[in-house]
Amino acid sequence: MTTATTPTPREMTVIYNREDKIFRGIVTGGALTSLVVLGLIGLFLFLRGAQVFNDKGISFITGVNWTAGTGDGAILDDFSIGAMLVGTIVVSLIALVFAFPLAIGGALYLEFYAPTRVKKPLVTLLDLAASIPSLIFGLWGIEIFTRFGERWAILLSKWLGWIPIFNVQFENFGRSPFIAGCVLASLIVPITTSVAREVYSRTPRDLVDTCYALGGTKWGAIRSVVVPYGKSGVIGGAMLGLGRALGETVAVYLLLNLVFRYNFRILESEGGNVASLIATKFGEATEYEIKALVAAGFVLFLLTLVVNMTATTIVQRSTPRA
Amino acid sequence: MTATIAAPERPVAEPKTPWSPTRSSRIQTFTTLLIAGIVAGVLVLFTGVAGLDGFGVTFFVLSLALAVIRTARLGSKERTDMLMKVVVTSAAVLAFTPWLSIFGSVIFKGYVGIRPNFFTQDMGTTVPDDYLEFGGAIHAIVGSLLMVLIATVVTLPLGILSGVYLTEVRGRLSFLVRFVVQSMSGVPSIVAGLFIYTTLVFATDTFSGLAGALALAVLMLPTVARTSEEVLKLVPEDLRSAGYALGARQWRTAFMVVIPTVRSGLTTAAILGIARVVGETAPLLLTSLSNTVVRVNPVDGPMASLPTYIFGYLQIGTENAVLRAWTGSLVLLFIVLVLFTLARRFGGKDKR
C-alpha cells in the first residue's frame, strides 16, 4: 500500500479592511465586558471597603465580633468576619461531604446502570434541578427537610456524640450547620453530577469494552478505567459545587441562626456564613457597617473567585475541547 | 455527482445483547426488591425504625444483604459488582429524591393559593395574614418580568458578541475571555448585588428596579455568553468559507450567514440566561428591595419581584403569609419550567 500524501493547505494571508477592523474592534470590546465587569466588581468592593480593611487590618478576617457601635462612644464599632468565614467553610464542607458521593453515584448510575427508558427522563430531571432557584431549596429546607434533618441529628448526637464535632451543649437540633449543609448538598448535587456525567461519558468506549472483553465486571470496568480517567474532571466539578455553596445566601439565611462565635459543633443550632451575614445586616446597617459588609463581600468574592478559577482550570484541562 | 445506489434489501438480524439481563435474572431482581420492600415496611410499621428515611435505610441494608446472598455461588468479583450496583443505584436515588420532594411539596402546598386574585391583585391594601381570597402577587410578577426584560436587553448583545469573538474573530484573548466568563459564572449572587449597590444605588441614592435588573444582568452575562459560544460553534466551517468565497467581508459573513443560522440557538441562550436569574433573591435584597403595589417605572423607587415576595412573606411567618410564599414559589417554579421547556424546544432546532 502506498501512503497517500495529503497536500498541505496553502498559507493564507488575511488582510482585514477598515470595515472588518471596526467589526473586530466592536466584537472584541463586547467580549471584554465580562473582564471589565469582573474587574470593576473587585475594584469597587475593595475601594468601598478599604476603610474597614485599613482600620482593622488582618483582624477583620480573624476576629469574631460583629458589634455595631452606639455612636456616642459607649460601645465602639467592632466588625470582623472570622466566625462567619469559619461558618462558611464548615457549612460548605458538610455540603460537599454529602454531595460528592451522591453526585458520583448519580453520574455513574446515569452513564452505566440506568436503563435507556429511565435515563432520558432522569437527565431531564437533573437539568431541571440545576435551575431550581436556591430560594425554593431554602423554603423546602425549613418547611419540609428540617423534620428529617433533626431526627438524623438526634441519632448522630446519641451514637456519635463522643466525637467533638457531633457534640452538643443544648438539646436543640433545628437550624444547625448540619441541616443547612444537607440542604446545600442537594443544591450543589445537580451541578457536580452534570460535570461528572460529562466527564464519565468521555471515557473512551473501547477501553471500557476491553475491560468487559477481558472478563471484567461492570464495576471492574468502572473502578479500573472510568473512575481514574475522570478523576480530575470530577474533582473540578466538586469544586464548582463548592464555589456555589460558599456563596449561597438565601438558603443559608433561612436555615441558620446567625451566631458570632467559632462553631465547629455541626449539630449545634448556631452558625452563619458571609453571604447570609451581608443579607441579614444590610437592612439596618449604619454607614460604617455597610462598609464593613462590602469589605466582607470583597473577601467572599476573592474566596469564590480562587475556588472557581481553580475548578475551571481543572475542568477545562480534563474535558479537552473538540 | 454519482447516483446513490440503494442498499439491497436484506433481513436484518436482531443484534444479540448477551450483557442484558435474562428473564430469570430480571425476575430474581424483582423478587429481591419485593422482599426487601416488604421486610422494610414491616420493620417500619412494627418496630422503632420510623418514617420514610427509616424505610429507606432498612431497604438499603436489606438490599445489600440480599445481594450478598444472591451472589453467594458466583465468587467475590460478582459479589462486589452486585454490591456496588446496589450502592450506586441507592446513591442516585438519594440524589434525586430531594428534587422530587421539592417539586411535590411546592405543588402540594402552593396550589391552595392559586386563585384568580393572585394574578390580578397586589398587596397594596391587604395585610400579609389576610385570607387568601384577598391580595395577590401581580406587582411581584410584573416587577420580575420587567427586571428580567431589562437584564436580557442589556445582556443578550454582550453575550452574543462574546460568543462571536470566540468563534468568528478568534482573537488572541480567546483563552482569557473563556476563562473569565467561566469564572464570572461563579460570582456569588450577593456579590453582584453588592457591586450594583456600591455603584448605582450609591450614586443615585435610590433603590430601584433598574438597579435590580443590572444586578441580574451581571449574573446572566456568563450564562448567555457561554451558551452563545456553544451554539455558534455548531455552525459548520463550510458556511463561513462559502460566505468568504462569495466575496463577503468577515462582518457580513458573521451577521448574514453565521448568526441567522443559529437564531433559535441564540434564543435558547437568552432563555437559559433568564431561567438562571429569574429566581435570584440575594442581589435583589440589596438593590430593588420590595414594595406592595404595581410599579412599572424601573427608576421610581423599590420594586417587588417574585423572589423577594416569597422571601418577604416567608419571613413574616404567619400561616397565610407562608402560604402566599408557597404559592409564589409554585408560580416561580412554573415559570422556570416553562423557560426550560422552551429552551429545549428551541435548542433542538439548530442541531442538524
Image (cartoon, coloured by chain):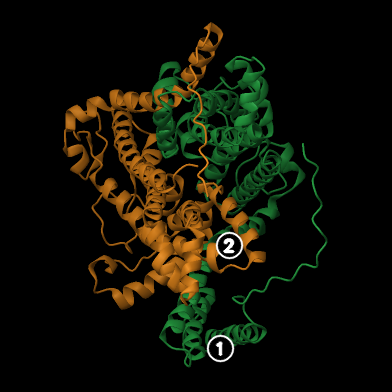
Chain colours: A orange, B green
- The amino acid beneath tag 2 is Ser
Q: Residue A266 at x, y = what percent? A: 31, 62
Q: Residues within 10 Å of mark 2 (few under 14, many from 20)?
A: some
The residue lying toward the viewer, choosing from B240 and A243, is B240
Same subunit, tags 2 and 1: yes
| Relative to A127, residue B307 above or below | above
- Residue located at (48% from left, 14% from top): A25
Secondary structure under the numbered disc 1 in the rendered image: helix
Towards the viewer: B99 or B49: B99
Q: Chain of mark 2?
A: B
Q: Can you see residue B74?
A: yes
Is residue A181 in view from this perspective? no
Q: Chain of mark 1?
A: B
Which residue lies under the disc numbered 2? B101
Q: Nearer the viewer, residue B7 or A315?
A: B7
Q: Position of residue A55 (x, y in %)?
A: 18, 29
Give the number of the disc on residue B252.
none
Mark 1 residue type: Val
Q: Quadrant of residue A90?
A: bottom left
Dot 1 surroundings within 10 Å: few (below 14), some, or many (20 or more)?
some
Q: As drawn, which residue projects farthest toward the top?
A: A18
**Residue depicted at 48% across the width and 25% down the height:** B170
Q: Quadrant of residue B310?
A: top right
Determine the CA span between mark 2 and mark 1.
24 Å
Residue B39 has which mark? Answer: 1
* x and y percentages locating residue B101 in the rendered image: 58, 62
| Closer to us: A56 or B126 | A56
